[in-house]
Image (cartoon, rainbow, N blue to C red):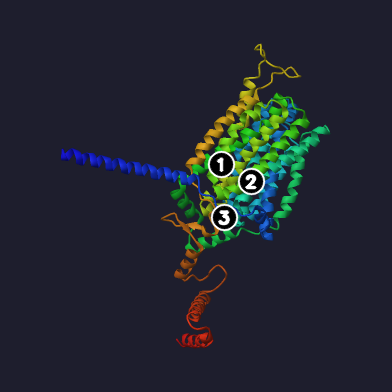
Amino acid sequence: MGKSSAADVEVEQIEKRQDSAVKRHLKAFRDSIYHKPEKPTNMWHLLTNLTNTQRITFAAAFFGWTLDAFDFFSVSLTTAQIAKDFNVEPSEVTSAITTTLMLRPIGALIFGALADKYGRRWPLMADIVLYSLINMASGFAPNLQTFIGLRAVFGIAMGGEWGLGASLALESLPIEARGLFSGIFQEGYACGYLLATLVNYAIEETGSSWRILFWVGASFALLAIVIRFWVPESEAFEKQQEARRVIGRSLLKETWIVLKHHWLRLIYMVILMAFMNFFSHGSQDLYPTFLTSQLGYTPTQKTVTSVIYNIGAICGGTIIGYYSSYFGRKLCVAVCAILAGCFIPLWIYGPNIHALQFGAFTMQFFVQGAWGVIPAHINELSPPAFRGLLPGLAYQLGNLISAASSQIEATIGERYPIRNADGSYKLNAEGKQIADYGLTQAIFMGCVCGGLLITILVGKEERNKDFMEHLVEDARSGQAVTPDDVNASRIEQGMSSDGNGKSESDEKIHRFESMQEKMTLEHAESVQPAETKQHEQHDSTGKNAE
């Protein structure tokens, strides 16, 4: 009987410990998603409280990403015209979009590695010049094969823009402003789409060739090139370079440390960015074609609808990005994924044009609302020494995985065209079957919303991390090496130079003078104000004598 009671007590204790462990895990999971929000800083204060250098740096990154998006969406907006000109199906033209997306990781790898080795500024300059030239050449393509080849090279150039631009912009900004400007930066994408939509509308209304859109996009890049001449190098990058010199670590060694400690995080970042790219490309790339081919919208109706949902995207990215600094990055993305899924029926099957436009506005508000969080979130997750490479590489590898979004939707829609009530195929004015792009987009986006929700909830968050306090990582622990650690290491090693051309003797003198000044100040604070001057002189004389 006694033995049985003891066993029961032991079992009960084990169950309590298990219940306690489960509760701790659930609490940790809840806390990783939701934090009690801090009091938000006034948005207008954040917008106006920047230095001139910070404004120029952010403007350069923003305009570069805007023009990048303009050039990319030039294909989406002119898919039907290009197909007609080259006498092919729209799904064949969308292979140019797929090719562009597939080759962007190569550009992210090349330009990102250059940025972490030599700095952000000049790789960004080279990048924008290259993709502008290729975009102009795209307007002269004589056939689809040449066009796809040029878009492939454009994809390599485009791959370097987002990661480098986001790193340069966010490294230069105050921490409290990071969420807001993350959203504004990302909506350069929507601004580029909106600008391309308006230019394309003018081209269609005048009956001009689709090729003009590509030439206009290339000419706009001149503005971004001029602005970037005034952009200084990232201060965070310069301190990282100094830290590497002090601790004697090569970029190759740093790469090994990152892979050793963060390989699982790198995989997670790629999966997250894959779902984010499915989220945006699945809801945007084929939508203009859906409006004209399936719903029969006129160029004016298509343009107005595109303007409406791009305004929704800009509002969503800015607002959600701003509040992510207070409610948390993960929570904001999760809410956007849920609400975007709720508005899929209205986005595709709105009973009239006004209802559908409202659905499109709301859909892009939440799609780009989630994206407004990403530049800040992905840079905060990245190991400090590879903030130029890893955000862009993860983003573009996600693009590679999601590259066929529009082509999948277009191909399935063309394979299962719309039928009339009697079972016959519905035909357009030219006697061709009308592809059911709407249904394929609806199913596709429903799956993506669910996958994104799960992915964002299981990940980590390092909201409002101080980039200046995370320069490189310790080889053993993987913990951040701070500027104080670097200074201590420099003093311990008795380095001959601190990176500013000081000799070893100069450095010793400087350290002695600093110690002397510190001791003097401490002594001055410990005596009466009336006796301060006398004691300082006496103390100083005593030290000099020593």
Q: Is residue 357 above or below residue 245?
A: above
Please identify, in this view, whether the residue under mark 1 or under mark 2 is nearer the observer.
Answer: 2
Is residue 278 in sight in this rendering? no
Q: Earlier in the sequence, mark 3 or mark 1?
A: 3
Q: Is residue 455 left or right of residue 79?
A: left
Write down the residue under mark 3: 117
Residue occupying the point 43% across, 45% down: 27
Horizontal and vertical percent position of residue 115: 59, 53
Task: Please state which of residues 221 and 199 is positioned toward the viewer in this rendering.
Answer: 199
Point 67% across, 46% down: residue: 65
Question: In the current view of this chain or complex, which residue is farthest to the right?
Answer: 206
Q: Which structural element holds mark 2?
A: helix
Image side of residue 341 versus residue 28, left or right = right
Give the image location of residue 417, x and y in percent.
65, 19
Q: Residue furthest top?
A: 422
Q: Which residue is mark 2?
A: 319
Gap in Å between the C-alphas at discs 3 and 1?
32 Å
Q: Residue type at mark 1: give it.
A: Val
The residue sitting at 72% across, 35% down in the picture is 306
- Report how far apart the C-alphas of labels 1 and 2 lie in the structure: 12 Å
> The residue under label 2 is which amino acid type?
Ile
Residue 30 at x, y = what percent?
46, 44
**Along the polypeptide, which appears first: circle 1 or circle 2?**
2
- Location of mark 1 (residue): 333
**Comparing marks 3 and 1, which lies closer to the viewer?**
1
Q: Secondary structure at mark 3?
A: helix
